[in-house]
Amino acid sequence: MEVSIIMSNEYPLNVPAPHHFTFAVRDIPDVTVEQRERVLKATHYNEFAFPAGMLTVDMLSDSGTTAMTNHQWASLFLGDEAYGRNTGYYVLLDTFRDIFERGGEKNWKKILDLVRTDCRDVETMMEKVYLPEYEGGLFNGGAAQMERPNTFIIQQGRAAESVLMEIVKKILAQRHPGKVFTIPSNGHFDTTEGNIKQMGSIPRNLYHKELLYQVPEGGKYEKNPFKGNMDIEKLEQLITAVGPENVPLVFTCITNNPVCGQAVSMGNLKEINRVAHKYNIPLIFDVARWAENCYFIKMNEEGYADKSIAEIATEMFSYCDGFCMSAKKDGHANMGGMVAFRDKGLFWQNFSDFNEDGTVKTDVGVLLKVKQISCYGNDSYGGMSGRDIMALAVGMYESCDFNYMDERIKQCEYLAQGFYKAGVKGVVLPAGGHAVYINMDEFFDGKRGHETFAGEGFSLELIRRYGIRVSELGDYSMEYDLKTPEQQAELANVVRFAIDRSRLTQEHLDYVIAAVKALYEDRESIPNMRIVWGHNLPMRHFHAFLEPYPNEEK
């Protein structure tokens, strides 16, 4: 007799049921304000250099700070540390095919399970893992991956960006010596912008700034307004103004991290693809937070309510010609990254060199592979350990779980609403999928000039008083003073409160809300900051020295 258990609504509760628990406990040390002051001075007021062990809550980044699941920890023991073609290499590439190309869970092959069950049938492993051929998508396999490599494992997103940009820079410099190019995006993150500037190109951010800081009455939208969308009109105007031949790539950040973690709609991605391809320009996605964006599309965009996160992901990735990924975010892992481009697609066509008869003279994928191997290791691991590769593969599947993603995004909204209800000005609403942002111009009532780096003053004072570390992503980090007037107008002067995956409790968030409320009420006493060393260093916020000086505008 078959017995089924049916969930009942007979005894409803006004709270959600828990979905996980943890046995891991980490004590937080008692640290005085005076001790934090000493360390701030010793580390030249660089928030990245402040010791994490002296913090109460660390919200500097959600990158690699995830608390991994029991399935991920178990998978570490299955890591194959072989130098050439470790088992995890095959598993990871097919994990990406499952989620980004196969159209949802019903089509997953999930060869990960063969490894997890210790399959020793050699013929089965050959047939399903080692020898399958794949071509025509973002993840070639078998002979095609050797002949036309288009997928590159890298240990983190920043390195992935660097590999891509250095090869693009080299190719463009050979073809057009001395020429300056423009690379537009809905929002370039700090590392992306840094890599673009180091290749001698000009980054531009084309989003709807007038929409970003709008807050509806009561602080809540009925539907997410997709504030991370690219302004399509601005994109087309920019391309025609500088000339399509001077725009080698169009970038799209999903979700839009520099624009306050805001979501990008599927409709907008289609339009970006349309405009980019109209001018024969490859479209590259920055997909560190792909699953969060899929969640927002599912919950807010017409036609997607009945689709899974994986189904939405497959459509979303169909609109790009390539992508860079930090898998330390929505890979739900502590390490990992990826560069990939579509087999024989527009990126490959534009950056490979061909003979007169149409045969390939220089394949851009081969150039990328050479760079990957020379900088990060053999293409089967790209700087990642076999253990990390297995944990990442498991984490990718886990990020497709609606319950996990729902809980995560509601945690962000709880923090944002907590700030808003506490009367803190400048809170960006709705919250993004990984963090909450506060507009520093509004926080300080428009009284602090760009030269004061007041957002950095806010961040450092939050460390000093309350042991809370956040990330300034405004005038200081995004280099307002080094930008053109057009670029300055595109900058969001914000501070980010990143929420680690599966790690922070409501108790942590309530502490942060109380601290920010207290600091807001005493905001006139927050010092300004000046740069005393490293003013023009690339990505200066990681290593520049600062010092505080009193705010005299009361």
Image (cartoon, helix red, strand yellow):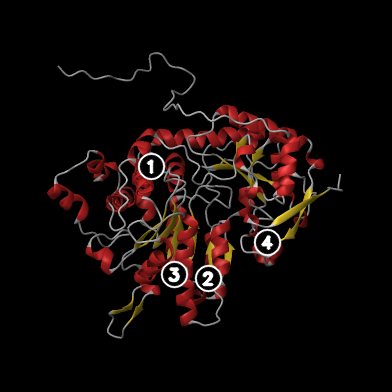
Mark 2 touches mark 3? (CB < 8 Å): yes
Please identify the quadrant where the C terminus is shown.
top right
In the displayed structure image, the side of residue 120 where residue 296 appears, left or right:
right
> Disc 4 marks which amino acid?
Gln
Q: CA distance from mark 1 to mark 3?
A: 33 Å
Residue wearing tag 1: 395
> Disc 3 marks which amino acid?
Ile
Name the residue rendered at 55%, 58% in the picture: 191
From the top left corner, tell me how far across and down residue 360 is, in percent.
30, 78
Of pointers 1 and 3, the one earlier in the residue sequence: 3
Mark 4 touches mark 1? (CB < 8 Å): no
> Disc 2 marks which amino acid?
Ile
Of pointers 4 and 3, the one earlier in the residue sequence: 3
Residue at the far left in the pictured view: 123
Crowding at dot 2, Cα within 10 Å, few <14 / some 14-19 / many 20+, comes out as many
User: What's the mark number on residue 239?
Assistant: 2
Crowding at dot 1, Cα within 10 Å, few <14 / some 14-19 / many 20+, comes out as many
Residue wearing tag 4: 488
> Disc 1 marks which amino acid?
Gly
